[in-house]
Every structure is written in C-alpha cells, then in structure tokens.
C-alpha cells in the first residue's frame, strides 16, 4: 500500500502534468522479486493540464494512438525485462518515481540522523556521510544491487550519541537496522512501523528509555528484535504481535514500577500475549530484577520455542506444568530460570523435552523431590537445581545422563547416598553437593571414571567416606 501511495503521489504532484489513475485495483499492482509494488495499466486515466479546466479520459493503451499521449506529455510505457522505459529509453519505475527520487528519500532520512548526532568521537559519520558521494558508499550503509535502495544500516560500535529520528521510518527497503553499542537515548520512534521489509533490529547496549512500543511488534516481517542493556521500563500492548518474530531479547533493562500520585503503580509483568508469537525460538528477558508476576503458560504452547532465559528477575508462582506437555510438541533446549522466587515442585514432565541441554532452576523456592524421569534427558549437559528446598534422595536415574558436564545440587535438603554410578559418567566436569545431609562414599575409581572432572564439592554434609 505504501508503494502504491507513493506512485499516486508522484503522478499527482511529481510529474510534468498531473495524472489521475482511474482504475486502481489489486490486479493493476505488480510486485517485483523484492515485493516492491508497481502501479500499472494506465488505460483509463485523466490528464489535468495546467491551462485547461477540462480533463481527458484516455482509452486503453492497445487502442490508443501514441501521438495522443505525447501531446499531453505522457510518456508511452512499455515493459521490458522487468524494467520500465519511456520513449527516450530512460528507466523509470511503475511506482511513479525515478530511482534517483527514491534514493533521495533514503539520503534525506540518513542526513536527518547525521544532523542529530551530537557526539561522533571518530568523526566517521560526520566526514563520510557526504552528499558528494553515493549513499551506497557511506560507512555502515548497504544498498540493494538492483534498485540501489538502502537495505541495511549498521552503525554499531561508533560511540555515537543522540536520539533515533522518526525519519528512519522512510527507509522503506530497510531489512537490517543495527545501532548497538552506542549512546543513543530517548524512546523508540513509532514510525519504525513503516519498515514493512525490516527483519532485524539490534539496539543493544544503548540508553534507550520508555516503553517497548506496541507498534514495533506490528512489523510483520520482523524476525529478530534485540534491545538488551537499555533503560526500557515495560512491554505494552503486544496483542497484535508480529507472527514472524523468531528472537526477542530484552535482557538487562529496568522494567521498573513508576509511581504517580493519581494512579497506582503498574506492575511489570511478562505479557501473556507473547504467546501469540507462534514462530518464536528465543526469548531472553534476564536481569530485569523488577520484572514480576508469573511465567505465562501460553509461552510453552509455542512449539518452536528453543531457548527461554528469565534469570535474575522477580518471577513468582509455580513453573507452568504445560512445559513439555505431550499436547504441545516442544523444541526446548535451554530453560534458564535461576535467581527468581519460583515455588512449587519441579514439573514431572520435563523429561518429555528430549532436546533439553541446559536446565537452570537454582536459587528459587522449589520444593519436593527431584523427578526420577529426569534421567531420560539424554541430551542434557547442565543441570542446576541448587539453592532450593528440595528433599529426598538423589535419584539413581541421574547416571543415565551420558552427556552431563555440570550437576549442581548444593544448598538443598537432600539426604541419603550420592549414587556411586555418577562417577562412571566420563563427561562429568562439575559436581557440587555441599550443604545437604548426604552420605558420600567415593569409590576407588574416582579420577579414572571421570577423567574430565574439574571440581567436586561435598562440603558441609553428614558424612564423607572413602573406600
């Protein structure tokens, strides 16, 4: 729609005479391989002459004498090898704008960004972004090989300081926008929603503030959104979440409660609507210590979800028991939920997530026993359940974990013997069982069955025996 609107604007105001296309409909819009819209079929159109009050309706091109077109200043358009030429053999676009005009739109947007930069320590942008050179040669700018439109803007690690201008929303061919590791501040502009080809946003390590705007989730082409290490305060209104988003990283932000004398404080919780991101593979919301509430169960209905990281927040309640449910096939590989305030028992059906390699539930308030079926997770490399209130014995099934490298069981209320068969796992590097009530009997083969062991910690237990 934006492409067609641009074409109509050019026909009305940018051509030598005003042209009214009287037959705008879906069948008269052509899409090229970049999904750029081109307006076609001017068989029914009106030419508005500057000195004539009358308008003339043209017949279809096939039945119309070309001379009738020339006298009204309209070039005869023909399609040849996916390009469009006028009678002087000059390439033009059916969108109604020349390539130069379209490129100038990109130049203007980037020049606004340039003028907004208050600090450019290496003067790279200040010296390199010059109108005397093609925009496609500017540092951090990549253009398409066919249309010479800006398709990528990567000005990361330049130490730039200022705000993000709304004019970046005019870079209509942009697929990648990366400004990470700078000092940009202020809010994210609403106008980014115009970038309907945008796939990747990386604004990590800046000083951006305010809410994560709902508009950014309405970019249907967006696949990766990374806003790590900023000062963002909350996620709002994601009910129209982009269905193609695959990776979302909002770790190390503030997500603070803001107080107002007329309103109650707003709780910073994970919106359940994130469960609408049906293509999501990676969700990282770690180190937002004021992020509260329960983990939405809808997240675990996303069959493509591979990584969920919520470490070091203030999440409460039970871990949803639909995690690894047989009703929802799971691709989960990493579940990192340590350093929260989660309660209840460790879900018994974790073993259904056969692809799991990392589980970290340490330093929460989990109770109950270690599920025996956890021994079925044959891909598991790291299991950290230390710092909880777990009771009972260490299940012997743990020795069925052939790839386990790290096993953290310390600071619980575990009793009984540490299964000697654990020491037959050749991949084991780390085993910590301190601060329990365990009886430890180390077999004589220790050091031979676990050749890769780096740390064994059994301190502050009931008894330590050597055989």
Image (spheres, helix red, strand yellow):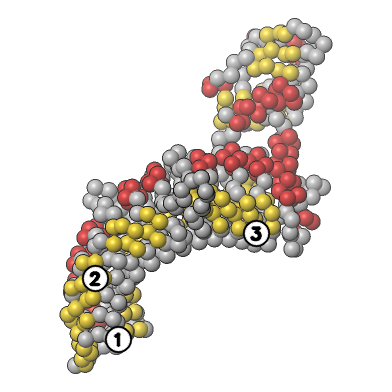
Could you say which is closer to the camera, residue 93 or residue 332? Answer: 332
The extreme front residue here reads: 261
Question: Which type of secondary structure does the marked residue at label 3 adopt?
Answer: strand
Question: Which residue is pictured at 74% across the width and 10% down the height?
Answer: 68
Question: On the image, numbered disc 2 is attached to which residue?
Answer: 390
Query: How far separated are the C-alphas under marks 2 and 1?
Result: 18 Å
Dot label at residue 459: 1
Q: Residue 59's quadrant in the figure?
A: top right
Of the two numbered discs 3 and 2 in the rendering, the one whose residue sits closer to the viewer: 2
For residue 392, say whether it is visible: yes
Question: Eyeballing the image, is 62 above or below 160?
Answer: above
> Which residue is at 26% across, 52% downward?
322
Q: Nearer the viewer, residue 396 or 137?
A: 396
Decide if residue 134 is on the left or right side of residue 427. Answer: right
Work out which residue is located at the far top of the displayed protein and give it: 54
Neighbours of disc 3 within 10 Å: few (<14), some (14-19), many (20+): some
- In the orientation shown, which residue stands out farthest toward the bottom? 467
Q: CA distance from mark 3 to mark 2?
A: 45 Å
Label 1 Cα neighbours within 10 Å, binned few <14 / some 14-19 / many ≥20: some
The x and y percentages for residue 14 are: 75, 26
The answer, for residue 222, to whether it is visible in the render is: no
Q: First in sequence: mark 3 or mark 2?
A: 3
Q: Residue at x 28, y 50 (%)?
A: 329
Residue 77 x %, y %: 69, 22
Determine whether 3 is above or below 132 in the image: above
């Amino acid at each position: 729609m934006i492409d067609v609107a641009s074409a109509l604007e050019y026909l009305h105001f940018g051509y030598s005479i005003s042209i009214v296309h009287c037959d705008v409909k879906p069948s008269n819009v052509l899409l090229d391989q970049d999904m750029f819209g081109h307006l076609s079929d001017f068989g029914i159109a009106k030419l508005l002459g500057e000195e004539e009050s009358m308008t003339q309706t043209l017949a279809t091109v096939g039945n119309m004498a070309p001379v009738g077109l020339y006298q009204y200043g309209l070039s005869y358009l023909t399609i040849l090898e996916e390009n469009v030429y006028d009678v002087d053999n000059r390439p033009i676009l059916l969108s109604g704008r020349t390539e130069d005009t379209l490129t100038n739109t990109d130049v203007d947007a980037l020049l606004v960004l340039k003028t907004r930069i208050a600090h450019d320590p290496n003067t790279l942008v200040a010296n390199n972004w010059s109108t005397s050179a093609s925009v496609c040669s500017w540092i951090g700018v990549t253009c398409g090989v066919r249309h010479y439109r800006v398709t990528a803007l990567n000005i990361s690690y330049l130490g730039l300081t200022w705000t993000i201008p709304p004019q970046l929303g005019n870079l209509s061919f942009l697929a990648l926008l990366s400004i990470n590791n700078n000092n940009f501040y202020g809010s994210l502009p609403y106008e980014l929603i115009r970038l309907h080809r945008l796939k990747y946003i990386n604004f990590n390590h800046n000083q951006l503030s305010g809410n994560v705007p709902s508009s950014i989730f309405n970019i249907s082409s967006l696949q990766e959104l990374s806003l790590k290490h900023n000062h963002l305060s909350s996620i709002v209104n994601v009910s129209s979440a982009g269905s193609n988003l695959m990776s979302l990283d909002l770790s190390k932000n503030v997500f603070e409660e803001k107080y107002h004398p007329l309103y109650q404080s707003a709780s910073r919780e994970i919106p359940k609507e994130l469960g609408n991101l049906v293509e999501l593979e990676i969700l990282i919301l770690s180190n937002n210590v004021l992020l509260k509430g329960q983990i939405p169960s809808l997240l675990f209905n996303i069959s493509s979800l591979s990584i969920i990281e919520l470490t070091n927040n203030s999440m409460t309640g039970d871990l949803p028991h639909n995690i690894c449910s047989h009703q929802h096939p799971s691709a989960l590989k990493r579940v990192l939920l340590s350093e929260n305030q989660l309660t209840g028992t460790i879900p018994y059906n974790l073993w259904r997530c056969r692809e799991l390699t990392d589980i970290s539930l340490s330093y929460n308030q989990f109770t109950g026993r270690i599920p025996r079926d956890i021994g079925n997770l044959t891909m598991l490399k790291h299991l950290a359940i230390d710092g909880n209130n777990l009771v009972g014995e260490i299940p012997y099934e743990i020795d069925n974990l052939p790839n386990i490298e790290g096993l953290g069981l310390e600071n619980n209320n575990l009793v009984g013997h540490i299964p000697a068969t654990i020491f037959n796992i050749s991949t084991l590097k780390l085993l910590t069982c301190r601060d329990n009530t365990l009886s430890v009997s180390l077999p004589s083969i220790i050091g031979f069955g676990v050749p890769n062991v780096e740390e064994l910690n059994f301190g502050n237990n009931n008894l330590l025996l050597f055989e």
